[in-house]
């Protein structure tokens, strides 16, 4: 592949979008979501070189150097302690070093992604090297971006939205049981965290990835915020008692909806076609893999109507005999029609809720056109609260 598009006259913004597509090329693999630390390499290199207006050859060298030793997290440390808090820093630092090294004249191999002994060979169960250059200038992965409005794991958002919707209807009545019906993805992620949970002594990483505690908190308080994962909130016995009464039920239709949506897996599955079936069998089982089958490539499509579906349905049985039900397929902030209409306002509201300067949030609207010094000044302003 050798990055021929780097010499083709495309703008830096198109190079940035194209380099983000390396993550899509590794979607069908063992690392995803917060454990896919290599995405920080791509984002940091692309962001810095775009801000510097670097020439095309430096992009190829910087990416070749940055991806020479991409990070692979140890999940026991990721979930069992606080290692996750520093995981993002290491690849960003490595990306900065790679950019500086490329500027100094060091070279990287130009086929680092697709070479038989390259990145995708190690980081993808089903490598999709064709995604990296497919639809150059037409496919914009930024159209499929989702924004996490509340803390929590990647599959819990819809369930938390449902819990917040139900909170006013509960009116303080004791909750006897919660049935959370959801996809295989959410159940898998929650079970990875379960073995590390220990009440108020639970590691933060496991707590964020769990299912019971976030849903119980939202049902009892009407929200889910950063302080809910800190003392004294995590020591609240009522939350843990209710978390223990959250029962998970797999729904095959929801797993099909998950797999059919553009994100987190659908675009990669459609591109891979029959190549994806072994990965799909491991993830969802033989029956769902057969149902999904091979589908058309995305080579002629785009992401302007992208959807991220991580569906969930909550049925809350109250002590008085009532059962309240709420269901959501696309979480608030996830890619979909609602987010496309108001993603700026959603993200600004989240930024301000965490103590950010609303004026800095407005200034970030022009981030793509700012110089490196302007970005540095804006970040200082945004964080200096």
Image: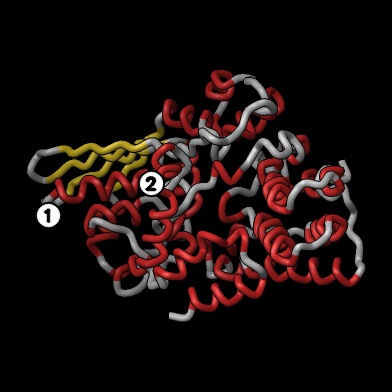
Q: How is the image coloured?
A: secondary structure
- From the viewer's perspective, is residue 269 above or below residue 50? above
Q: Residue at x 71, y 27 (%)?
A: 275
Q: Which mark is residue 266?
A: none
Q: Is residue 202 above or below residue 159?
A: below
171 on left or right of 16: left
Residue beneath disc 1: 172
Query: How many numbered marks have been drawn onto this rendered protein structure?
Result: 2
Query: Is any part of residue 277 visible from this angle?
Result: no
Q: Residue at x 63, y 41 (%)?
A: 140
Residue at disc 1, secondary structure: loop
Label 2 packing within 10 angstroms: few (<14), some (14-19), many (20+): many
Quarter of the rendering containing residue 316: top left
**CA gap, disc 2 and disc 1:** 25 Å
Question: Looking at the picture, how far across and down is residue 282, in whole percent?
Answer: 61, 33
Residue 185 percent location from the top left of the image: 49, 40
Nearer to us in this view, 45 or 373? 373
- Decide which of tag 2 and tag 1 comes sooner along the chain: 1
Q: Is residue 159 visible?
A: yes
What residue appears at the point 72 percent right and 42 percent down from the top-left corner? 124
Residue that badge 2 annotates: 332
In depth, the one of 363 and 79 nearer the eye is: 363
């Amino acid at each position: 592949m050798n990055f021929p598009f780097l010499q083709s006259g495309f703008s830096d913004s198109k190079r940035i979008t194209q380099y983000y597509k390396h993550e899509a090329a590794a979607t069908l693999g063992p690392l995803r979501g917060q454990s896919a630390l290599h995405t920080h390499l791509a984002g940091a290199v692309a962001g810095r070189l775009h801000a510097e207006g670097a020439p095309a050859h430096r992009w190829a060298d910087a990416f070749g150097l940055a991806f020479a030793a991409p990070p692979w997290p140890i999940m026991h440390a990721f979930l069992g302690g606080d290692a996750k808090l520093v995981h993002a820093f290491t690849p960003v630092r490595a990306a900065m070093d790679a950019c500086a090294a490329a500027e100094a004249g060091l070279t990287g191999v130009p086929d680092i992604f697709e070479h038989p002994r390259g990145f995708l060979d190690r980081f993808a169960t089903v490598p999709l090297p064709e995604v990296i250059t497919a639809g150059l200038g037409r496919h914009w992965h930024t159209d499929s971006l989702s924004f996490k409005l509340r803390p929590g794991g990647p599959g819990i958002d819809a369930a938390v939205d449902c819990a917040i919707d139900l909170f006013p209807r509960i009116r303080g009545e004791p909750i006897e049981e919660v049935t959370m019906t959801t996809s295989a993805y959410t159940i898998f992620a929650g079970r990875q965290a379960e073995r590390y949970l220990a009440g108020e002594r639970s590691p933060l990483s496991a707590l964020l990835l769990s299912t019971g505690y976030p849903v119980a908190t939202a049902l009892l308080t009407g929200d889910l915020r950063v302080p809910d994962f800190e003392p004294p909130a995590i020591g609240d016995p009522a939350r843990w008692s209710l978390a223990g009464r959250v029962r998970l039920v797999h729904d095959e239709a929801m797993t099909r909806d998950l797999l059919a949506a553009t994100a987190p897996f659908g675009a990669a599955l459609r591109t891979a076609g029959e190549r994806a079936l072994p990965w799909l069998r491991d993830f969802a089982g033989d029956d769902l893999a057969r149902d999904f089958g091979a589908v058309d490539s995305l080579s002629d499509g785009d992401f302007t109507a992208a959807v991220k579906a991580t569906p969930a349905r909550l049925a809350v049985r109250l002590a008085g005999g009532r059962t309240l039900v709420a269901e959501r397929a696309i979480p608030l902030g996830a890619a979909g029609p609602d987010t496309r209409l108001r993603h700026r306002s959603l993200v600004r509201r989240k930024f301000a809720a965490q103590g950010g300067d609303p004026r800095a949030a407005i200034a970030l609207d022009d981030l793509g056109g700012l110089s490196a010094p302007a970005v540095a000044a804006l970040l200082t302003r945004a964080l200096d609260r």
